[in-house]
Amino acid sequence: MRRERMLPYAYLSPAMVLISVILLYPVISGLLLSLFNRDAYNPSPSFVGLKNYLLLAKDTTFLLSLWHTLWWALSVLFGQYVLGLALALLLNKRIRGRAVFRAIILTPWVIPPALAAITWKWIYEEQYGILNSILMFLGILRTRVAWLGTDRTAMWALIAAGIWQGIPFVAIVLLAGLQAIPLEEYEAAKIDGANAWQCFRFLTMPHLTGISFIVIILSTIWNINQFELVYILTRGGPGNATQVLSTYTYQLFFSAFQFSTAATVATVMLIILMVLTGFYIRRIIYPR
Amino acid sequence: MKNKRVLSFVLGMALLIPMAVPPAFSAPVKIRLFHMTWIPGMIDVMNAAVDRFMKDNPSIQIEQTRVSWTDAPAQLLVDIMGGTPPDIAEANPTMLAQFRAMGAYADIRSAIPKQLMDNLLPSALNLIQTPDGQIDGYPCDGATWGFFYRDDLFQKAGIASHPKTWDELIATAKKLTVGDQWGFGVPTQAENAVQFWQCWMWQAGSPVDKYVSGKWVSDLDSPEAKKGTQFMVDLVQKYKVMPPTIVNMDWEAVTNGFAFGNFAMQYNGNWIIPALRQKAPEIEGKWSTGLTPSAAPGMKTATMGFTNVFNVLRASRNKDAASKFMNYWFLTVYKEGKTFADEYSYVPLGMNFTRDYLKWARAHYEKVLQPFLDLVEYGKPLTMAPKWQQFAELFGRAAVQNMMQGSLGVDEGLQTLHAQLNQLQQ
């Protein structure tokens, strides 16, 4: 009996050992690194405790990056959810070629992020980019805009690219949720005189609450972790107008060689993501 | 029976002897060469040098690792910290300063031949010599940064001569700023922002960062630094001869702009010439080059002008083999009387910072390249302070771009940067 109870753990143990080595070891190393003052020029780093965290609280670039990260993550999430839901509702209808459309909308998600970022860089290019050409042709713009070159437009340009990239995941997951809604409920509602908006508000959205929560949490985690898009498009510039936590961590470690400070920023990101992950896990274990 | 015993003995020895011989005597020495060569002709020269060296030295094998300039510092750092350092690594002055401060390079005074040392230009020698007298690198291909002019646009605007001073630059650029055409462009995206910012401050007479009594001290609070910074900002904000969006343009974007008539003048490196010719062959003969202007009549100009360096790493287990390859690279004639190092510099129309090469280049380089040879005299390497790159990445780049876009005042910007640089360097 006891042996039978231990058996699942035995089966899981190789995977747990692998995960511990690949995931836990770097995380713990990073945490420990954040408690020292290690950089490329200091041959004898010493333990400084939480001093790096206190310094970070006064680091204006860190605070700006944190703000940008939250702004970026929430804006992209909002766009992804609204447009993803709209797409899911459309794809839930019985239209000809529905299967083909469902495959096509996955395209932004399957393109490698770096390749997508390079493509968007060309789309936004001031002189030769297709976006300026189209908008000037339609008469919406009279002069070309450097979408990535000014602090007023750079973040919005990034947000648009981020939304494009994440819509497919949201759409496909919400579509699965829509298809799980019993049709009889809509029929009953129509019999009771409900219009389309009322059906959407009182039937569709309540059914989608659970799955929406999962989508929102996962998308937020991925958006906060986003690096390629920001780094390739703007590298955090112009100025620090699009600097986010992931690019700031990279800059600190690989350009400024400030290893402990980079680890500190990464740890702060980890804490934010763990809080979100906690919500996700709680939802999975205790579904309403 | 006796023959069988003899045969058994011989066979046994034939099997045992190779096992008893230490591996060092049977396997070739392997060295890894880490470099950032990206121009196709230069890659051919490097491959030819490696192949010929290995043929002439069969006991030494060379493995090449080629990375982009952008990724190079991070990749080299990862290699060193990961315990798999290359034996030879290329570096620009910024990387040289950073990795030198980390103690990454070996002292190669005893390995570098006298004939090479005697031939080096003073600027190259200053670069590879550490403050305590060690020699830690071999200078390789170099470049200088100068001005490019669209003579067809100058003619259209009725301008007969190229600007020689800042005042003339402003006046000329204003006349050339018409419609979609800007008078002037200089790369200001990413690391370019701080690099060219230094040039303006040098031209104004500031050393930017000084080595005084054994430590580096910021000069960013000097009137000269302010003059240079203000001039750079005014090109965008006051005189409006450069677009504010220049902060998002790297060397290629500015070159494209120059090629297609969006910039009538540009400030860039001589190595863009092959790319310019490839992008816009139709403007061949319609553009020329010149020295960078001086801040005022009678003042000397200044610009970036430096050589990249090949270093043998301290962690290399095959320093002798690595030095042997580098000496072969510099002293072996490849073709038309030029060594591998000479040809490597010649392909991108750059400079090998030796007296012999400068003499040869003056006699053989075309007219558009002559100003860049003249600029060797005025060329400076990027600041060699160990913490400069850290300062540039964390504070300098954003501040310079913000000043150019008008969201940060010059006085406030310089005051903050001066304090930040000194704090990093203390």
Image: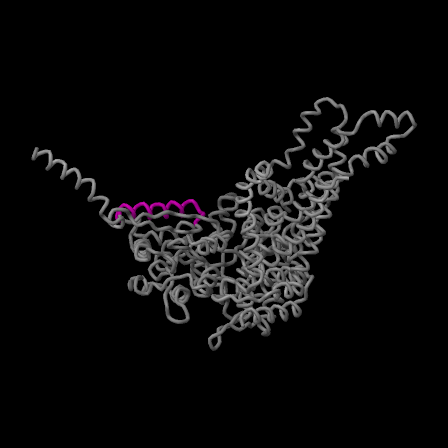
The tally of labels here is 0
Q: Nearer the viewer, residue B14 or A269?
A: B14
Outermost residue, right side? A193
Residue B379 visible in image: no
From the viewer's perspective, is B90 left or right of A114?
Answer: left
Q: Where is residue A93 in the image (x, y as percent from the top left)?
A: 77, 26
Q: Nearer the viewer, residue B308 or B163?
A: B308
Q: Quadrant of the C terminus of chain B?
A: bottom right
Q: Does the magenta stretch include residue B40?
A: yes
Outermost residue, top side? A96
Outermost residue, left side? B2
From the viewer's perspective, is A192 left or right of B300?
Answer: right
Q: What stretch is highlighted in magenta?
A: B37-58
Q: Nearer the viewer, residue B13 or A173?
A: B13
Q: Position of residue A243 (x, y in %)?
A: 64, 55
Our reading of the magenta stretch's main secondary structure is helix
Is A41 located above or below residue A183 in the figure? Answer: below
Is B307 located above or below residue A216 in the figure? Answer: below
Is B127 located above or below residue A274 in the figure? Answer: below
Question: Residue at coordinates 51% horizontally, 66% vertically from top-left?
Answer: A45
Q: Is residue A196 magenta?
A: no
Q: Where is residue B83 in the image (x, y as percent from the top left)?
A: 42, 54
Question: Residue at coordinates 30% horizontally, 61% vertically from top-left?
Answer: B111
Q: In which quarter of the image is the N terminus of chain B?
A: top left
Residue B67 visible in image: yes
Question: Residue at coordinates 41% horizontally, 58% vertically from top-left?
Answer: B309
Q: Where is residue A130 in the image (x, y as percent from the top left)?
A: 65, 40
